[in-house]
Amino acid sequence: MFYSKELDTLRSSLRYRERQLYSDKIVDLASNDYLGLAYNKEILARAIEHIDTSAPHSPAASMLINGYHKIHKEFEDELCAANGFESGVVVGSGFCANIALIETLVRRSDELFIDQSYHASGILASKLIGGKVSTFEHNNMRQLESFLKNSTAHRRIVAVEGVYSMGGDLVDKEVFELAQRYDAILIVDEAHSSGVVGDRLLGVFDLYNITPTHRHIKMGTLGKAYGSFGSYILSSAHINEYLINRAKPIIYATAPSLIQTAIALESLRYIGENLAPLRAKIDRRKAIAKEILGVEPDALILNIPQVDTDSAMKVKEKLLEEKILVAAIRPPTVPRSIVRMILRVAVKEQDISKACFSIASLDVSTDLCLSI
Ligand SMILES: Cc1ncc(COP(=O)(O)O)c(C=O)c1O
């Protein structure tokens, strides 16, 4: 067979992956449905109503042909109004949005400064570009500053995540000052921060009280807190104009799904109308983790480092026996295996406590190295 050797190597190094269907009775602490909106049938009903009254139900063309629909525009306008950005564009997925941003903005005489823990889509995009790429150590603002200071590039573009997808930690606020001081464009991937942090649950611009300017770009995915699928890029009107003219994942792809965009629009409204109860549920889950495991996560991702891949798999299996699903994340996704637990607001507090107690009760010396 063509790839038997490669597959055997993956198996023997415990890196072989399989898709699995899990029972819907399981306690889900693995998915990124932070606010439980992927199960909210009221949101779904409202989105369907929205679609019913506005034919067609499929865009059937690129946004640059005639696939741009008023639901896309409505969603972009509401996102801009909520987040304080001039312009927005919906994109098929967060993966494509990162490819679009990095491949389009970093031209031959430019330089990209990217956090080493940035999502795989950004790292892949960084390999497609003509410009120079400087990868800085995770959240190391001193190293980023020295790279920026020594750069002779025409344009400097910095790429960070609001909350890092694997570590679960917040980006250092100083990145906003550095972008300003060194006249850089700043891309913030808010996949795991929008809907989870900030007074208005809008992400790190909201949390750090940053008023967006012409240098700021916020990218977000709809497949996590917004309980849908797709993504968006918010920026200045100038950057938006450029993306629409040059970004291949925007130009050469069918426009994003209308029903998924409508679901995300209803979710955005729902979050805005239910801020206090949602924030209370988020805070409570973080407090439970603190009470039981001694560490309060920055957002809703609990990252539990493991001594090795075998231990990560064992922790996952042990929790599965208790009908709790967590993710075992292995290299090459992370340098060292971790167990990743999402403290979803849809999961009952007693189930979050149960999962935390189970993690805490594992034999720390042999199986688990608990230093979040
Ligand atoms: C930080 C980050 N950016 C981008 C993506 C890709 O987004 P999407 O799933 O919408 O393609 C993900 C994960 O899915 C992510 O965790």
Image (cartoon, rainbow, N blue to C red):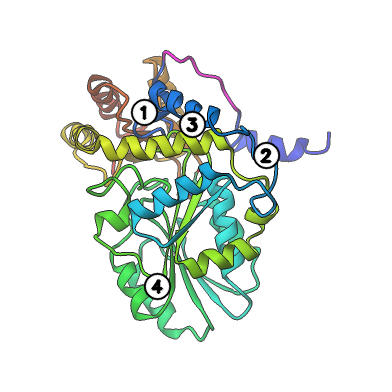
What range is drawn magenta here?
A: 19-25
Which residue is denoted by mark 1 in the rendering? 36
CA gap, disc 4 and disc 2: 36 Å
**Which is more foreground, mark 4 or mark 1?**
1
Q: In which quarter of the image is the N terminus?
A: top right
Q: Do the residues labelled 4 and 1 touch (CB within 8 Å)?
A: no
> Which tag, 4 or 2, sits closer to the chain's start?
2
**Neighbours of disc 2 within 10 Å: few (<14), some (14-19), many (20+):** few
Label 4, on which residue?
144
In this view, the mark in front (1 or 2): 1
Q: Which of marks 3 and 2 is nearer the N terminus?
A: 2
Q: In the rendered view, tell whether residue 280 sits above or below residue 183.
A: above
Q: Distance between the residues labelled 1 and 2?
A: 38 Å
**Pointer 4 local density, CA inside 10 Å: few below 14, some 14–19, many at least 20:** many
Q: What element carries label 1?
A: loop
Confirm whether the magenta stretch covers residue 24. Answer: yes
SS class, disc 3: helix
